[in-house]
Image (tube, grey):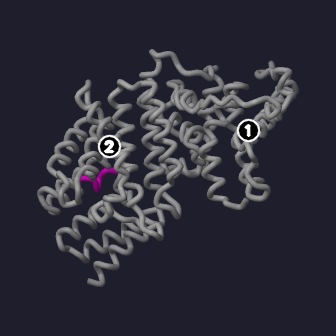
Amino acid sequence: MSDRPGIEDLLRQLTPRVLGAVARRYGHFDACEDAVQEALLAAATQWPRDGIPDNPRGWLITVAARRLTDLLRTEQARQRREDTVAGWVLPDDWLAPPADRPAADADDSLILLFLCCHPALPPGAQIALTLRAVGGLTSAEIARAFLVPEATMTRRISRAKKRIKDSGIPFQMPPNEQLTERLGAVLHVLYLIFNEGYASTAGPSLQRRELAAEAIRLARMVHGLLPDDGEVTGLLALMLLTDARRPARSGPNGELIPMAEQDRSRWNAGDIAEGVALVSAALPCGPTGPYQLQAAIAAIHDEAPSADATDWPQIVALYELLMQIADNPVVTLNHAVAVAMVRGPGVGLDLLAKLDADDRISGDHRLPAVRAHLLEMAGEHEAAANSYNVAAKRAMSLPQQRYLRARAARLVDE
């Protein structure tokens, strides 16, 4: 079999399950993560040539366990040579390959998720490690998401794994009283994984369905664990309501189709119904958080029969509530668009000007892209074309680049 994209998708889906199985059995999370990465590399090399094995998960667990054995024996030998106390003691049954025994069917993704979000790690390390171990992103992909060099991100992940090792954290779900303190990081990580899947920050594809699907799967697991938490419910609703539009977001050649031009009959009605029900149940209960508000905004978009029928005043009101509790320039950007739809593009452009001094977004392609859209609405086509071209130069996603350049070219030709 030579379907490399299919193999890559499969490996990404299996990564947290294989890592969870190996870590549960052998401990040593940091060494297990290294061993699983080596097993994934071996699979990426061998499977396109030899075909996918009948039990790909078992194959990966076997290879990872053997790599782990080698790693730990090497470490023990090094420590003995340095006359230090061996930190890891191998049980006798490590000599038997794990393929000789049935692998547990348990999915340890949820344990991995909360393990990576342990308070012993700083927030940035929590997110980076979870994106690597649970989301299956490479160090390069995570580095792009954090806007740092790949070498910097690799060191950050290595330090996070060492902290996990040094802390002696057991591979198990934290007790109930510790769930809350880790929940914020867990939800933020899932949000980032979903966003990278729904709108890839770089590369040839507009979206990476397997990442979005994995984020939704994990969000469902967290919701099953904490069904009465409003923000957990809100995040799951937001993912479903957003992902419902995925079938209509791209054309036959992978080109980007903006929401206003999408065929809404292609939106997933089942996901919309579930998302609306979830956010409707969460909003009246307890304090309202940012994920619930974002889900409510997504629900208004999804329930509108057409772009022209969108309840923009209600969206403006929700964004203004969101801005009171979330200092996020993307929220401010989206609020400017909503205001422009209600009060005109000039007002929206005035609001955008305030973001030019915000280093968090001033260099992002989204700021000139939105400015171009509002300038186009105002009839300032030359300025809009220039802004679209600036946005295209900043964008790292090829479909986004093509879309932005096409908008600029169309305005020049008019």
Quadrant including the N terminus = bottom right
Q: Which residue is drawn at 65% across and 26% down?
A: 165
C-alpha separation, residue under disc 1 versus residue under disc 2:
37 Å
Q: What element carries label 2?
A: helix
Task: In the displayed orientation, state which residue is furthest to the left.
Answer: 343
Q: In which quarter of the view is residue 18 placed?
A: top right
Judge by depth and name the residue closer to the eye, 273 or 119: 273
Judge by depth and name the residue closer to the eye, 24 or 299: 299
Judge by depth and name the residue closer to the eye, 22 or 53: 53
Answer with mark 1 or mark 2, whichever residue precedes in sequence.
1
Q: Does the magenta stretch include residue 254?
A: no
Q: Is residue 100 left or right of residue 301?
A: right
What main secondary structure does the magenta stretch of the protein show? helix
Q: Residue at x 36, y 68 (%)?
A: 390
Q: In this figure, which residue is indicated by the disc labeled 2?
A: 273
Residue range (magenta): 354-359
Q: Which residue is drawn at 80% across and 34% down?
A: 99
Foreground label between 1 and 2:
2
Residue 227: horizontal and vertical position, in percent? 39, 26
Residue 157 is at least partly visible in this image: yes
Quadrant including the C terminus = bottom left
Instruction: Answer few, some or many: residues within 10 Å of disc 2's Cα (few below 14, many 20 plus, some between 14 and 19).
Output: some
Kind of residue indicated by mark 2: Ala
Residue 373: horizontal and vertical position, in percent? 26, 66
Residue 368 is at least partly visible in this image: no
Q: In this figure, which residue is indicated by the disc labeled 1?
A: 58
